[in-house]
Image: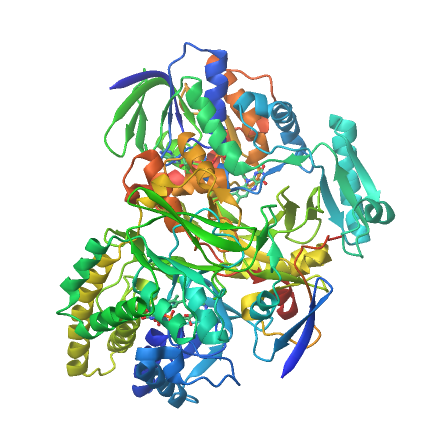
Amino acid sequence: MTTIVIVGAGPAGVRAAECLVAAGCRPIILDENDRSGGQIYRRQPPGFVRSAQTLYGTEAAKAEALHRSFDTLAGKVDYRPGTIAWGLHAGVIHTVKAGRVDRIAFDRLILATGATDRIMPVAGWTRPGVFSMGGAQIALKFQGCVPGRRPALVGTGPLLYLLANQYLKAGVTPAGVFDTTPFRRQLRLVGGLAWDPRTLLIGLRYRLELVRWGVPVRCGIDPLAIEGDPAVTGFVYAKSGKRHVIACDGVALGHGLRSETQLAELAGVSFAFDRRTRQWLPQRDEEGRTPLGTVYLAGDGAGIGGADVAEIEGKLAAWALLHDLNAAVDDGERTRALRQLRRAARFRAALDAGFPWPHDIAARLDDGVVVCRCETLTAGELRRVAAEGAPDLGRAKALSRIGMGRCQGRYCGSACAEILSAALGCDIADVGRLRPQAPTKPLHVDDVEASL
Amino acid sequence: MPLSFRVDGREVLALEGDTVLTAVLLAGIRLRESEFGDGPRSGFCLMRACQDCWMWTDHNDRIQACATFVNQGMVLSTRNPELT
Amino acid sequence: MSVYDTIIIGGGIMGCSTALHLARAAPRMKIALLERGLCGAQASGVNFGNVRSNGRPVSQMPLSLRSREIWSRITELLGVDCEYERTGALKIAFRDEDLAVLEGHVRDARDGFGLAVEMLGSAGLRQLFPWIASGAVGARHSLDDGVANPRLVAAAFGAATRRHGVDVRENFAVASVSHSGAAFSVVGEGGAALVARSLVNCAGAWGNLVASSFGEAVPMQALGPQMGVTEPLPFFILPSTSTVNSPIYFRQVRRGNIVFGGGPRAEVRPDLVRHYSLPENTARHAALLRSVAPALKSARVIRAWSGIEGYLPDSLPILGPSATTPGLVHGFGFCGSGFQLGPGVGAVLAELVLGGATTTPIAAFDIRRFAPAAAQETRA
Ligand SMILES: Cc1cc2nc3c(=O)[nH]c(=O)nc-3n(C[C@H](O)[C@H](O)[C@H](O)COP(=O)(O)OP(=O)(O)OC[C@H]3O[C@@H](n4cnc5c(N)ncnc54)[C@H](O)[C@@H]3O)c2cc1C
Ligand SMILES: Cc1cc2nc3c(=O)[nH]c(=O)nc-3n(C[C@H](O)[C@H](O)[C@H](O)COP(=O)(O)OP(=O)(O)OC[C@H]3O[C@@H](n4cnc5c(N)ncnc54)[C@H](O)[C@@H]3O)c2cc1C
């Protein structure tokens, strides 16, 4: 029997599983979370009884559909929640679940690992009360909490406006929305109108809602500092050359998303630099095949596309896999999915153009700003090793320890690349990337002993 | 159902289904001190990725506060105890 | 075409140390150092960081002691703090029958070479190092041994070499080497050609490229020792620690992380410059860590890695003049223990390049010991 493993039970992983089950396969699904749904459609803990409408807003129907689909797969898939895929080598995935390590030899693997927030640091971002944009949203969806009574939302991207609206619904009026992207730049979003008018209209409604509630929205700002004693008391920013301070007791910080590519890297997939998003991404064809032949990629883990794209890519990857195993695949459905994907790609391009990663901020960060929160390393330290002759991130890591902490560079990697390339005056692609290494998440020594 | 547990010797109340992070922050306590002396931390990503919400338990172990539900009677500390 | 007095192939600790010693001894000499990637990015920059003389074969001791003297002034030599520290080293026995082996080592090292090394019984061990698992029956405690941060050492060697006026060419991959009777010619993958009167082969696990070009390939195997590191913990383990009969060694850096390593070594791809850390090794080592230092049970492993190292059948390096080609000297294949030897090897190779002789006994490392095997390989 062919062993098929899917890592990730978000929109991409769930749709992939569904297609595989429809074709008579019984995939193994690994997910670190205790419940399916992935990030956007994260389910609340058992016993919490908020409605789908409350939790998922405009996307409630999609969330419910995805959860329902997954629930009907029960018994037809080998679902292993609470399981981390921590290592991958030579066709074997290494897992840890509830204090035990295990391994699975696979014939085919679909990586649907999703994303985490992409962060441009700002002075004071390690203070209690500062959360990632995604984290602040999880607090709301998963725990019904908000960081502070008057949080400031700082960064850029659609999530900024979505979260502000979710807060309003939860009865919390944000201290303001502070977007690093100038408003005229955001007008490029209009270019996406033809490809996804629904989403754009939702976005517009979010903006109007903020105006209606009197929430200040400032675009084209330069974040200067999060102040506190030590917990957050205010946010300082510059706009049009003037310095402003706004009182707040929490901050949600985020500048879009970055793909979780560790397992693709360990599998040996080759990476290429994507100029548009300024990230290194694993190489795959439109249907998710990698040159390795046994490994397929889908969803945000392979490049940020959003939840709808993740669902489409999940299906495409499963069909590609089935096709490669000589199983029959409905060509009509496949063609339709490809068409949807191309349309979505155009919309994504407009979104990326309208909310760019604010890479230019990196060059202006004060030397004292902490970049790597795990090891408490500053922008100045990184510039020092650049001056000492570190020509790329690999050497900068060796000399300064950036990316060597517990999070493996997830939260500092993007900013480190920008700071280094600015300090060296070289192209961003030339500084390379921090190579992830196993374990993908910290591995408890005790978990291993118990099972040897 | 209300639960209680201890952080640095202080009693903290929580509800079933609360993560340790939620309960500790609602009680106005910081999760942890940075190992490198630059002050308190209170988590960041809430999705087990940033690794900045580890707290110490009373039996030489650690828990990730964002991913651990409160248990009645847990005993936690915000500082790294000495090892021997 | 660029003309040099000597060309060194390989910018690891061996090549850089050779260049550095040459440049200091003969400031007017024109030296090129060619490195495929960045200096110190291979074995020299990713190793475990043990700077250890104890436990080496007797034939390596003079070389190791020469190196040890240079390590003692390494900060001065390199101009940067590379976290070199004489932490002492422990080799622990958990079975009575292993004690005799350790006692033999202690006699050799102390009486033969004057090293500060002692045997500790179980009580002494417990008193000095209470974190060691019960069941330890004794240990060799060498007070002279220590550790350094290889990431910093290897890069600092490269930087010092450049400061001394050596023409350090990074991102220069040597494609072929030849000897015309009068001079060596070295051609890079990009086509650049260099000429020199003498040639030093410090190409590490890739050393056979040069050796075989001159008809003296050796039966070297490239393998990847397996490394890992935990999150930072309060500092409580000073000595670099290993045991007699289990494949684990570890040390704690001052920042708190436990660095560990062990066997079995994994396959590598020197042709692709790729090495792999195998998850089963990480898991095994994590478990063994705990069996030696039970307090580590709560530690989390945060990263694992490997590197590419050349191993010879007798576990001794190739160090000395070529048997086929005058003007060529070799220093490669250090079998997993070359980090400590690096500074001394550079001093020896510099002497060989300058005068054809060295004061340090190196006969045991002569490339001719593999001549029959090499001849077989050429025939095959
Ligand atoms: C915190 C957060 C909040 C977001 N909120 C919104 C929103 O409100 N609206 C919106 O449109 N988009 C949002 N997004 C983006 C949206 O989540 C994604 O576009 C969508 O979820 C992508 O689906 P996916 O299946 O590719 O990945 P995900 O939904 O992220 O699912 C990936 C799954 O893989 C699992 N996983 C990853 N690595 C491993 C491993 N090594 N071992 C085991 N399991 C693993 C994860 O636990 C996760 O469940 C958010 C993203 C994040 C990170
Ligand atoms: C994981 C690991 C752990 C170890 N632990 C220890 C330890 O604790 N203590 C200890 O004493 N030793 C240890 N060792 C061994 C030690 O690291 C090596 O013996 C030593 O670094 C070898 O130095 P080198 O300069 O010969 O090799 P390298 O550092 O590998 O340098 C050789 C250089 O030659 C370059 N090169 C090769 N071919 C070409 C070409 N064609 N053109 C241009 N350049 C080329 C390579 O790019 C490389 O940089 C360990 C080794 C490894 C891999």
Residue drawn at x 48%, y 68% as measured from the top left: A146
- Residue B5: x and y, percent? 69, 72
Q: Quadrant of the N terminus of chain A?
A: bottom left
Q: Quadrant of ligand 1?
A: bottom left
Q: How is the image coloured?
A: rainbow
Instruction: Pick whichever, C98 or A136, lies toward us.
Output: A136
Residue C175 in which image quadrant? top left
Inspect this view and state whether residue C98 appears: yes
Residue lying at 40% horizontally and 12% vertically, measured from the top left:
C29
The image quadrant where one finds the C terminus of chain A is: bottom right
State the residue lying farthest toward the top.
Answer: C28
Image location of residue C115, percent across then percent down = 74, 29
Q: Residue furthest left?
A: A194
Q: How many marks?
A: 0
Residue A281 lies, in percent from the top left, at: 30, 57
Q: Relative to residue C75, is residue C188 drawn left or right?
A: left
| Snapshot quadrant of residue C161 | top left
In the rendered view, tell whether residue B52 sits above or below residue B68.
Answer: above
The spot of residue C134 in percent (x, y) is 80, 57
| Image position of A66 with respect to C380: above or below | below
> Which residue shows up at 23% across the image and 62% down it?
A351
Side (left or right) of A262 relative to C13: left
Residue A107 in view (yes/no): no
**Would residue A42 be found to the left or right of residue C257 on screen?**
left
